[in-house]
Amino acid sequence: MIERMRRGAAGWALAVPAALALCMTAATAQTVVNGEALRNADAPANVGDWMSYSRTWDEQRFSPLDQINDGNVGQLGLAWYDDLETMRGVQASPIVVDGVLYNISIYNIVTAYDGKTGEKLWTYDPDVGAEWARLACCGPSARGLAAWNGKIYIGALDGRLIAVDAKTGEEVWTTRTFETEGLLNTYSITGAPRVYDGKVVIGNGGADYGVRGFVAAYDAETGERLWKFYTVPGNPADGPDGEASDSAMQIALPTWHGEWWKYGGGGTAWDSFSYDPELNLVYIGTGNGSPHMWYFRSEGKGDNLFLCSIIAVDADSGEYKWHYQMVPEEEWDYTCTQPMVLADLEIDGRERQVIMQAPKNGFFYVLDRATGELISAKSYVSENTWASHIDMETGRPVLMPGAHNTTTPHLMNPSWLAAHTWHPMSWSPLTGLMYFSAQEQPAIYARAEDGGFNFVHHRSNSGQAFGTMPELRAKLQEEANAKEKGYLLAWNPVTQSEAWRVNYRVPGSGGVLATAGNLLVQGTIDKTLAIYRATDGAKLWEMNIDQAPVAGPITYMIDGEQYIAINAGWGGSPVYNLGPFQTATAKLLVFKLGATGVTLPPMPPPADLPRPPMLRASEAQISEGRALYAEVGCNRCHGDNATGGVKDLRFMTAESHAAFNDIVLKGTLADRGMASFADVLTPAQAEAIHAYLIARGNEDYADAAAQGS
C-alpha cells in the first residue's frame, strides 16, 4: 500500500578534461535544448547538462564528466535530498538543464529544483486520478521527462501529453494521445517521452489488458499530431487505417490468424526509443502479445508481426523503413521494449553503425541500424530454456523442445519476469562494454484448456491456466525459487561475451550510469547506492540509503562541481526469495564530492510478522482465488505466488484482513494507491482472493517467522 503524494501547483569522441569541466557554470551555459545542443551534447557548454532521458539521443547513458572518478569517489557524500512522500516505486531518471533539475514522481507530479541546493522552484500536478494506480498495468509510475526549447514534456498516465513552461511550470498545451472512453480504454503511459528535432514521440502500455499498440509523434511547439504508427494490424474488415503504418500493416497482416483484433493484439511500445539524426530514423521497441497465449491470440499460427520487434521509421513521416523481430510466435510475455543503444563498433575489421538491445528473452542483439541486418546475437543468461541460439542465416530463434506452451505446466527461463527488464543500461565508449542488470527468474507457464479463455476488460488476459496440476506446480515453483539469481553484467558486444559480473543475493537491482571517471553507478537490492570501477567491476564506494533504487542514475555539473542524482524508490518485479521487504519512503538523492552534514532520517522500527488467520476456505475457493489473483493483475504489485512485491499480502495485519473486502471493493485505501476493484470483482470473488492469500500465508509463515522476516 502507498501514500499518494499531492502538492500544490507552483557520438563520443574524447572525454572532456576535468580542468575544462571545472570552468563550466550554470550561469554561463544558458543551454537551449534543441537539435544543435543534442547533436553537440559533449561540447563544453552542454556536457554539464542531462538534456534527455539517457542524456543523448543514442541512449548510451554515458557521461564524459570525470571530476568524480575511480581515484576520489570515496569522498562522495550526500549533498541534498527530497522526500517524495510515497512508498510506491519511483522509476524516473531526472533531467538537468542550466542548473535546474526536473524530476517526475508517481502520478506524473513534476518538480523543478535548484540542482545545487535542492530548493524547490515549482511543482506541477496534472491531477491524474487515483484509479489509474489500478487501471495501469504496473501502478502509477513514470520513467522520465523530455525538454525542448524552454518546455518540459510529460507523458501522463491517463494518456495526456502535456507541455509546461520550464521556468514557471505553467501549462503551455495538452493533447490526448488516446481516449479514455469513461475509463473503458485500457491504454496507459509510463514511459518517458522523447523529443527528436521538434517532434515529441510517445508510446503507451496496456497490452496485458487488451489494446492495439501504437506510437505517435507531435509538434513540440503546438501539440499537433504529426504521425501515428500502429505496431500490429487491426480488423482486416476495416481496411487501411490511413496512418503512417499502412504499408507496414500489409507486411504484418499475413502473419496473424483468427480474430486477434477482438483482444487488441498487443505490441505496445511502453518504454524504449532511440534516434539517429543522420539516418533520420526513430527506433521503436515493441512489447508482448495480447492475449499472451499464441494459441488463443492467433490460433497458434504465424509470427505475429510486429510483436517483440525493433521497428525503424522515418522521423518526419513515420513511414516504415525496416524491422527485426526477436520473438516470432510470442507467447511468453517477452517484450523488446528494453533500452536500445546506438553506437559505432569495429566488428571483423569493419566499422559498423549498430543498434544494441538486451530484451527479456535473454539474448543480446547487435543489428545494423541502417538496414536492420542481424550482426550477432548470443544468450547472456546461464540457462535459456526458450531458444538454443539464433540462426544467423534466417535471423530466427531456434526454439528449445517444449518451449511453446501447452496445458501441462512447465518452467521457462527467461520468463515474464525478464532476463533484463526496462531498467536502463549504459554503454561506455572508453571500455567498449555494455552494462545492465540481469536476472534469472524462471516462472511456470501453461495455457488454459480449450474454452477456458474468456476476455475480461481490465484484467491481465494472458490465456494462462493458474491453478491446474497443483502438485506439479509446487515442484516447479520450488525449482524456480532455487534457480533465482540477480547480477550486474558487463557485456562485450563485439565478442558477445561476458567481461565481468557482480552477483547480488536476489534480483531487483536497478538501472546503471557509466562515466568517463571509470565509474559505474547502480542502486542495489541491498538498499544501497553502489559505485563500481567500470573496467573490472571492483566496488569503490557504497552507501546505505534504506531503499533499493530501480531508476537510472544521472550526473551533471553546476559551478564546477559534479553531482550524481538518483530516484530511490523500489517497486520492481516480484522476487521469490526476498520475503517481506521494508524500505523507507522514496527519495530523490543527490551526491557530490566532499559533501557532509546531510543525513537521511532513520528507518521506522520493523513490525512483527503478523500470523495469518486460520485457513477455513475450501480448496475450490482457494483455487478460484489463485486464478483471479493472476487474472486481475494482483501479482503485478504483490508478486507471483503472492510472494514479495510492493506489499507482501501473505502477512497482512488483523485489521487489513478484517477490512479486506472494503479495501478491494470500496477503495478505502485509494488515497494510498489501492483503488477499488468493484468494477471487475464480485464480493464472492474478492473473498476467494482473500482465501488464497490466507492459504499462502499459512503455507509460508513458519519459515518466514523463523528467519525473522
Image: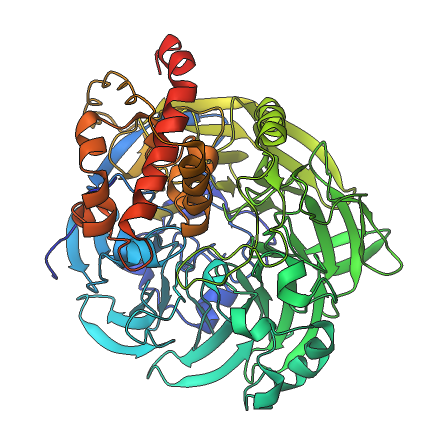
Q: Position of residue 143 (x, y in %)?
A: 39, 54
The structure residue drawn at horizontal position 62% and vertical position 64%, both measured from the top left corner, is 297
Give the quadrant of the N terminus: top left
Q: Is residue 299 visible?
A: yes
Between 566 and 429, the residue placed more toward the observer is 566
The structure residue drawn at horizontal position 20% and vertical position 28%, both measured from the top left corner, is 598
Disc tally is 0
Q: Residue furthest right?
A: 393
Tell me: residue 414, above or below residue 73: below
The structure residue drawn at horizontal position 55% and vertical position 88%, both measured from the top left corner, is 241
The answer to whether residue 274 is left or right of residue 652 is: right
Between 111 and 626, the residue placed more toward the observer is 626
The answer to whether residue 478 is left or right of residue 595 is: right
Q: Is residue 102 visible?
A: no
Give the quadrant of the C terminus: top left
Q: Position of residue 37 (x, y in %)?
A: 44, 67
The answer to whether residue 65 is left or right of residue 324 is: left
The answer to whether residue 107 is left or right of residue 707 is: left
Q: Quadrant of residue 703?
A: top left
Tell me: residue 460, above or below residue 594: below
Q: Position of residue 462 (x, y in %)?
A: 54, 54
Q: Position of residue 137 (x, y in %)?
A: 41, 55
Between 659 and 340, the residue placed more toward the observer is 659
